[in-house]
Image (cartoon, rainbow, N blue to C red):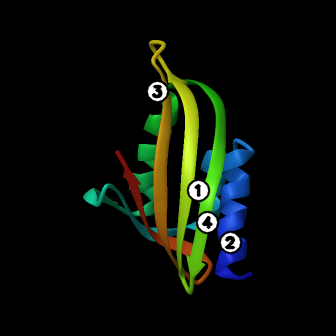
Amino acid sequence: MSTRDNVQAVIDGILAGKILETFDAWYADDVVMSENKQDERVGKANNREYEVQFLENVQEFHGAQVGRILVEGDDAAVEWTFDLTFKGGNRVVMRQVALQTWKNGKIVREDFYHA
């Protein structure tokens, strides 16, 4: 599969609500992830735990949308909008860009940029 096909598979999995299954399938064991290029998290297990903690704080997902998708070689950028309510009732619309680097069919780095 091409990088573009892999990126689409990740998008499809997330939109289908299979967030952890998608993470397990498409992220490398040594993946590095960050929020706004700060506080890098290293390793699949560490990053999966971060995702689990985030999901445990969500009361309800109202939807997600994908905007622009850019792919050049092994790099991709995906524009996301998530509508969700956190436990405690705080409903938010989150907008972010996920900048990904792919190697051997897996994401080896992903930086999320958001305001």
Q: Is residue 64 left or right of residue 80?
A: right
Identify the element where label 2 is drawn.
Answer: helix
Residue 66 image position (x, y, % from top left) = 64, 52
Which residue is more in the foreground, 78 or 24? Answer: 78
The first of marks 2 and 4 along the sequence is 2
Q: Which residue is mark 1?
A: 23
In the image, is residue 18 above or below residue 79? above
Mark 4: which amino acid? Answer: Ile
| Residue name at image x 61 percent, y 66 percent | 69
Above or below, 5 relative to 98? below
Distance from the alpha carbon under mark 4 to that under mark 1: 19 Å
| Residue that numbered label 3 is attached to | 57
Q: Residues within 10 Å of mark 4 (few under 14, many from 20)?
A: some
- The residue wearing badge 2 is 6
Q: CA distance from mark 2 to mark 1?
A: 12 Å
Q: Amino acid at mark 3?
A: Asn
Marks 4 and 3: in contact by CB < 8 Å?
A: no
For discs 2 and 4, the disc positioned in front in the rendered view: 4
Q: Is residue 63 above or below residue 60?
A: below
Q: Which residue is mark 4?
A: 69
**Amino acid at circle 2:** Asn
Name the one closer to the observer, 59 or 82. Answer: 82
Instruction: Compare marks 3 and 2 and give the one earlier in the sequence.
Output: 2
Callout 3 secondary element:
loop
